[in-house]
Structures are given as C-alpha cells and as structure tokens.
Image: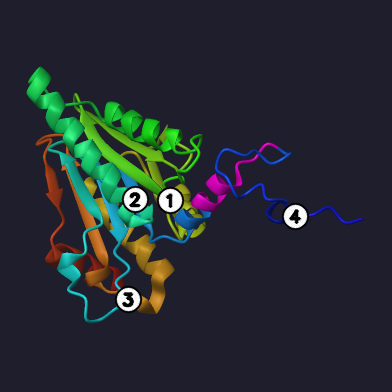
Amino acid sequence: MQPMPHQLMGYDRAITMFSPDGRLLQVEYAKKTVRQGSTAIGMTCKDGVLLVTDKRIVDKLVVPESVEKVWQIDDHICATASGIISDARVLIERAQIKAQQHRVTYDSPIDTLSIVKDMCNLKQICTQSGGLRPFGVSLLIAGIDDNETKLFETDPTGIYFEYKATVIGEAEPEIEEILFKEYKESMSIDEGLKLGISAIKKTLNSNFNSDRIDAAYISIKDKRFERVSKNKITEILKSLKK
C-alpha cells in the first residue's frame, strides 16, 4: 500500500498541526510564497547599508513611482520584502510605530535588532495559534547602530539571521551565487549598488528597465535614509552596457 501524501491526510489544514515527520506544512507553503515574490537584495558596505529590489511592474499602465518596495522605518533603519506585500506593510507600520515610541520614551534611536525581534515575535505567534495563517513574507531590515552596519533577514517562521549580504525572492539561487563570487566587505555603497542592479538585470534579462528598480541606502556618516534617484539607476544601467 502506497503511503498517502500529507496533504491528503489533512496535515496542512491547520497551522497548529505537525505532520508525522515534524513539519508545519502551512509554514512551508508560506516560504514557497516568498520564493515566488519579487527579488530583493541587501548588502553591508564599508560606508553604509544598501537595499536593492525589483518592483516587478507587469502592467504598463501602472505609475512606476507609485510602487514602493523599500520602506523607511526610522532615520537609520529601512526594510524591503518579498512575498505578500500587504503582509509586509502591516509589519512595516508596526515597526515604524515601535521606532517612534522608542524615540518619544527614551529620546534616542531604537537599535535595529529590537525592530527585528518585535517583527519576528509576531510572525512566530502566527505559527502556533489556531485560526491564524503565517505571514507570507520575508523581510530584509538594514540599519546603522553606533557606526556599525546591520542587515537582518526574517522568514515566515519568525526566525532571523544577520548577514553581510543576502537575497530573497524569485531569483534567490542565481543572485546568491553572484554575491558569493563578487561581493566584498570593502565595497562602497556605489559599488554595492552597481553589483545589486547588475545581478537583478542578469536574472530578469529582456523584461528589465530602470522603472523596475527601487533602491535605498543609509550611510554611516549621515545615518539617514536616502532613496536612490532614477537618474542614478539609469546611469548605472548605461555603464553596465559598456
């Protein structure tokens, strides 16, 4: 008699139900949602942190500037996401409020790890409570804490890791390979931006143009969120064609 797949046995019907081999299938499905999301890259550089992401604009009638894929959480912290972006928006708005409350209460900026832990606590609750579904989104959170660059990746389970450079979304395997080969800790923000845009361009091929890129950085010197202009992105694309 052939063993029945877990789906037919109903182990994926409830978030709180473990399969016999110790898996939470709904959480694994949420991870698959992230892998189908648009690509997002994070890098720590010698002079700051950088996020580069694909807006994935598939409708030519959409106004490209209206699509936001990198969000400011505080002056010194920003984030991007892959997966269900409406889920990400809820987590981002929660993080923004937490950062504001910290400034009002303690008259000092919140550290990046506190933001990450708060997000992951909520994600984790949604993996063990009946009637909920997991957040179908992974986030990259980048910040500057006391002149140190920080970059964290969170996934739907509520786990987080700190990285020097990482990628989430549909082109993760290909871009991860590029980062392994070409990323260096000694890179400047400009060099990292060029690498990030080049990596996304390679994976998107003919569907690619400057309207699809959203990028932002926070420098160690200024500790302020700065969005990369479309002109700068266009310049980099021209230099990649040479």
**Residue at coordinates 27% horizontally, 68% vertically from top-left?**
212
Amino acid type, label 3: Val
The residue indicated by pointer 1 is 136
Measure the C-alpha gap from mark 2 to mark 4.
Answer: 29 Å
**Residue at coordinates 34% horizontally, 44% vertically from top-left?**
140
Measure the C-alpha gap from mark 3 to mark 4.
Answer: 36 Å
Give coordinates of residue 90: x percent, y percent.
28, 46
The magenta span reads 22-31
The residue indicated by pointer 3 is 58
Who comes first in sequence, dot 4 or dot 1? Answer: 4
Amino acid type, label 4: Pro
Observer able to see residue 239: yes
In the drawing, does residue 155 fall left or right of residue 76? right
Assess whether residue 26 is covered by the magenta stretch: yes
Q: Describe the element under mark 1 as helix, strand or loop.
A: loop
Question: Could you tell me which quadrant the N terminus lies in?
Answer: bottom right
Who comes first in sequence, dot 1 or dot 3? Answer: 3
Who comes first in sequence, dot 3 or dot 4? Answer: 4
Who comes first in sequence, dot 2 or dot 1? Answer: 2
Give coordinates of residue 168: x percent, y percent.
42, 52
In the image, which disc is placed on residue 178?
none
Q: Quadrant of residue 234?
A: bottom left
In the image, which disc is placed on residue 87?
2
Density class for disc 1 (Cα within 10 Å; few <14, some 14-19, many ≥20) is: many
Give coordinates of residue 73: x percent, y percent.
19, 40
Amino acid type, label 1: Gly
Q: Quadrant of residue 151?
A: top left
Judging depth in this view, the residue of 205 and 107 nearest the camera is 107
CB contact under 8 Å: marks 2 and 1: yes
Who comes first in sequence, dot 2 or dot 3? Answer: 3
